Structure formats: structure tokens, C-alpha cells
Amino acid sequence: MRKLTLLTAAAVAGATFSSQAVMAYQAGDIYLRAGFDKADVVTDNFSDERGFSLAGGYLFHDNFGVELGLGEPVDHDFGLAGNDLGSVDRMPVNLLMNYYPLGGIADARVQPFVGLGVNYSRYSSLDEVDPYNLEIDDEYGVMGQIGVDLSLSDHISATGYASYADIDAEVENNGESIGEVKLDPVTIGAGVTFRF
């Protein structure tokens, strides 16, 4: 029994130490990420919401890569001047340039990253309160993100991230602007990244 326990302990230790040796982030890497996040907006006129997101990226240098991300459409309740106006789906699309300060370093299990780019927010499925005839214009804005990948194996990482986007929502009634709402969502999330 004692020999079995020692053999089991040795096997676990061997697996642990072998999992420490991970591939370096390097030029040519491609990754896919699935995550769950929460977007907190700065205004009380739109509700904070949660949703799933997907991202894919390519490292063209050991330390630099591009990333395209897409969030599922999330349903925000919204209003202006204390009036409930309905709900609208907002779908964020992000294009970022990421910097990996530890890229190219062999066996770096922790890979922090920072990114800067553009966010496109598409508004759709507007469910408004009668008698309004409302529209919300799609919007572009600057976006930044920070995050960290913790390597679990050669190809799989646990990822945590946070981002900020400079995004507004212009509400129109019969083609006339009735107000612009500053959203500026701060999004915090976690996910799993597969690198190949």
C-alpha cells in the first residue's frame, strides 16, 4: 500500500513538473478564446449586462499580435430624462493590437498582455415603449484592454481580462436627435484560450 502511495505521488509530481514546460508565445501563434463577461456602463440610463464573447488572434511577432473579438448581443434596458424608453440589443465588435511583454520567453506560464484598438457597437432589436418611434445609431470608439493568460498546458490557458471602450448611444425620435447617452462600458471577464 505504501509503495502504491509513493508511486501515485511520484506520478502526480511528474505530471505537475512536466506541465510546467510550456511553449513560448511566439510569432505565428494563432489563438481562439471563449469567455463570459460583464459590462458596466457609466450611465444610469442603460442597464449593466452580462454575456458571452469570442475572440481570435494572430501573433505576427513574439511580442505583438492582432485580435478580433465579438460579443453576443446583450439586451440593455434604457431611458432618458427619467422616462423608460424600452430595451435594445448592443453587440460589441473589437479590433485590437496586443502587446505581450513576455512573448518569446520559453516556459513563461504567465503571459500578461495590453491592447489598444477600436470598438464598433451595433444596436438592434429595439423594443420601445409606445408612442415613441426611436432609433439608436451604431457607434465607433477607441478601446483598450489588459489581461493575463495562465498556461494550463502547451495549448490551453485560463484568461482574465478587462477593457474600456469610449462609446456613446445617440437616441433619435423620427430622425431627430433627442439625446446622446455616454456608455463608456468597463468590461471584466474570464475565459479559456486555445493556442495552436
Image (cartoon, rainbow, N blue to C red):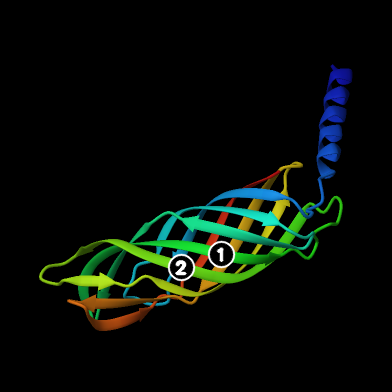
Residue 13 place in picture, x, y as percent: 85, 35
Label 2 crowd (10 A; few <14 / some 14-19 / many >=20): many
Q: Looking at the image, which residue is at 78% across and 53% down?
A: 25
Count the labels in the image: 2
Left/right placement of residue 196 relative to residue 88 reads right
Q: Is residue 192 left or right of residue 11?
A: left
The quarter of the image holding the C terminus is top right
Query: Which residue is denoted by mark 2 in the rendering?
Result: 120
Q: Give the quarter of the figure containing the N terminus.
A: top right
Counting from the top left corner in percent of width and height, residue 26 is at: 79, 54
Q: Is residue 182 left or right of residue 160?
A: left
Expressed as whole percent of the image width and height from the top left, the position of residue 39 reads 46, 65
Residue identifier under label 1: 95
Q: Nearer the viewer, residue 164 or 54?
A: 54
171 relative to 122, above or below: below
Based on the displayed image, in which of its 4 quarters is residue 89 positioned? bottom left
Label 1 crowd (10 A; few <14 / some 14-19 / many >=20)? many
Type of amino acid under label 2: Tyr
Which numbered disc flags the more N-terminal residue, 2 or 1?
A: 1
In the image, what residue occupies the spot 38% across and 64% down?
122
For the residues marked 2 and 1, what is the alpha-carbon distance in whole angstroms? Answer: 9 Å
| Residue shown at the point (57%, 54%) measured from the top left | 190
Query: Where, by quadrant of the figure, is residue 91 drawn?
Result: bottom left
Q: Amino acid at mark 1?
A: Leu
Residue 8 appears at what percent x and percent y? 82, 25
Q: Which mark is residue 18?
A: none
Q: Is the Cβ of the residue at disc 2 closer than 8 Å to that at disc 1?
A: yes
Say left or right for 108 vs 141.
right
Q: Residue at x 48, y 62 (%)?
A: 93
